[in-house]
Image (cartoon, rainbow, N blue to C red):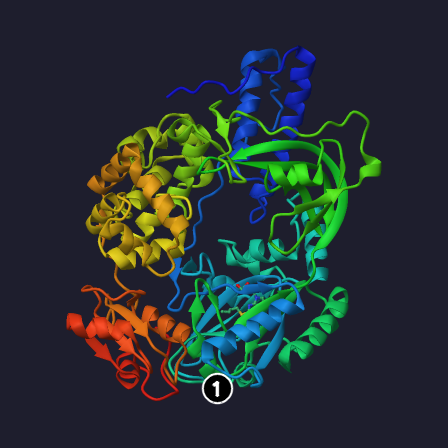
Amino acid sequence: MSRKPKAAPAEGLEAARAELAGLAERIAAADVAYHGQDAPEVTDAVYDGWRRRHAEILAAHPDLADPESAVGKVGSAPASGFRKFRHGVPMLSLDNAFEAADFVEFEARIRRFLGLKADSGLHFVAEPKLDGLSISITYENGALVAAATRGDGFEGEEVTANIRTLANVPEKLQGDPPARIEVRGEVLMTKADFLALNESQAAAGERLFANPRNAAAGSLRQLDARITAGRALQFFAYAMGEASAEVAATHWAYLEALEGWGFTVNPLRRRVSGGAEAEAFQREIGEGRAALPYDIDGVVYKLDDIGLQRRLGFVGRAPRWAIAWKFPAEQAVTVLRDIRIQVGRTGALTPVAELEPVNVGGVLVTRATLHNEDEIARRDVRIGDTVMLQRAGDVIPQILGVLPDKRPKGAVPWVPPETCPECGSLALRPPGEVVRRCTGGLICPAQQVERLIHFVSRGAFDIEGLGDRTVAEFYTDGLLKTPVDIFTLPEHEAEIAKREGWGALSARNLSRSIEARRVIPLARFIYALGIRRIGETNAKLLARHYGSFAHWREQMLAARVIGSDERLALGSIIGIGPAVAEELMEFFAEARNVAALDALAAVLTIEDAAAAGAESPLAGKTIVFTGGMATMTRPEAKARAEALGARVTDSVSKNTDYVVAGADAGSKAKKAAALGLTVLDEAAWRELAGRPPPEEAEEA
Ligand code: IVH
């Protein structure tokens, strides 16, 4: 497959030489960051853009080729050799708070959800938020049997042998732990050990780690556990995974039990009640932060009462009962070298700041987001400006503003491009939108590559051995163009085996991992399509609601008609708002998309959505709540129903399975009766939901 070069190479030999040198430097730096694992600093699209530009210039000026150049020598990243490990209970992340008001809102949300009075006391356990990597360790009859990284939260990598080398991870538990228990916590490296490691790496001519967290991750994820054994790593236990028996009624008591079994638990933990106490603790820990031997980036507040934690459950990927209150962002000043345009999967053009590298709170920053063109105009950011930037945790650094006194003479306002830098198609900004988009759709290489990368990513088809760079390379070489081509790759196994950096074994493994994904759950399939606004959560909602691929497809096509029953049904799925429905309709309005969908369906087995809690009597049922309940708030009832695999909708129709009518239920209950539907009172609902009078079992 051919693609037209995006622009003529630089004119003039000197300009070409200078551009080439600049590109080589950036590519080499990105390679170091990438292979120094866990620390890529640019997106693959940006990186690939540099390499393409580099190749184009060389094609026009072959004389400039430098045989010693590091560019061109870099192979693909080694495939991971760890076994996958499926977590029995997902390892989730935490919502963030940045200021006192966020904490107040967090508490208020808990009270609203549980139907508690505003003055009711809530108790939290506050613990430093350790900046390492989270690990799950399973014990059976007191003996360590398995350990795994968090991975995507559902599936991580098995690192048992590596974890066994950590001095403060007990091999055998003391006391009387449950027969089977999974303990979660953070593996970290102290700042001193990190510096010492980097010194010895430098002395040995090995690569350096960017920060203690990367050093911890890199040290743990060693295929040869003897290397891990030589690195100073520590484990702090802080959370519960699966357990065969109840350990404690409060998180505080659970932490004490952990200590009793032989784990290290962070000594800085504290019990706090209410926003004022949390704020005081936040300040105290923040002031002591620099003097701590390890990095922390905030404080985690967890509701102490485990019974209440269970009732609160999770929303999306985070518990409702805990929050990470982050420390304020760290700031720095540097020079904006250039503004580059990145083209995303959905064609969005994002301006990215290329910066004079600067150290911000221990991390070297070379790039920052500029959000969108309005932001650039509002802050009047110009190339050459000295800018103030900030970095908060894992978030991409942001430009806060410019220092006008330092503006070089002749700096001109930045003008957004009118064409896509990747494919040359018109780039338009629809009225009322902030984002400019490439109109090239399927012909835009950046969009195609980004779509493919998304398609094979972890939450989607999760094809091992098909990393971002491989996808980009296969795309460039014409092996891959659209998602369905992935499933013809096994036919090209011999050809792949001959490629640089490959071999018979890795090509075989790739074919195997592709074949293993021919059967795919509906939710993953929908997510993989990369439709705007359809993330994992929305994909799951859709899968759960429509059940099967055929039904979803048919309903979506019918829903294109405004006012149709199908359109109304789509709008009534709780969690799917009008903007999401609009994106779905846009996707299905495009014949090429439907054709691509059908091409995929023809080579795949798309599994019907197994509703969460498939064995529950509520799995797959549609429920409408109406009227107030005495023992449960509406959000709690809804969350419970959804956790048990039910769909909760707003309006009663013949498709409704249960109507739960609380006190003063009005017209909906009447309509239900008229339709002859099953109407439950609060007690019957609690029974069905497995919540007979308060205090109850594990969240599904
Ligand atoms: S509790 C469901 N406690 O923060 C709650 N997490 O943003 C599970 N982390 O992946 C997490 N220190 O790696 C918890 N004291 C602490 C923590 C902590 C650091 C990390 C952890 C988690 C991430 C969530």
The answer to whether residue 300 is seen in the rendering is no
Name the side, left or right, on which 400 lies relative to 441. right
| Label 1 Cα crowd, 10 Å radius (few <14 / some 14-19 / many 20+) | some
Q: How many marks?
A: 1
Residue drawn 57% across the image and 17% down it: 58
**Identity of the residue furthest to the right in this view:** 405
Residue nearest the viewer, comparing 285 with 321? 321
Specify the quarter for ligand 1. Answer: bottom right
In the rendered view, tell whether residue 462 sits above or below residue 258. Answer: above
| Secondary structure state at the residue bearing disc 1 | loop
In the rendered view, tell whether residue 478 sits above or below residue 37. Answer: above
* Residue 514 x, y percent position in the rendering: 30, 43
Name the side, left or right, on which 683 lies relative to 402. left
Q: Quadrant of residue 663?
A: bottom left
Quick one: quadrant of the N terminus?
Answer: top left
Residue drawn 54% across the image and 58% down it: 220
**Identity of the residue furthest to the left in this view:** 676
Residue nearest the viewer, comparing 474 with 271? 271
Disc 1 residue: CB within 8 Å of ligand 1 = no
Give, as a three-letter code, the residue at label 1: Ala
* Residue 547 x, y percent position in the rendering: 23, 57
Residue nearest the viewer, comparing 497 with 469? 469
Quick one: quadrant of the C terminus?
Answer: bottom left
* Residue 404 x, y percent position in the rendering: 81, 38
Query: Residue at label 1?
Result: 248
The answer to whether residue 370 is seen in the rendering is yes
Residue drawn 38% across the image and 71% down it: 639
Residue drawn 61% across the image and 67% down it: 102
Q: Quadrant of residue 55?
A: top right
* Residue 168 x, y percent position in the rendering: 58, 73
In the rendered view, tell whether residue 521 sits above or below residue 238. Answer: above
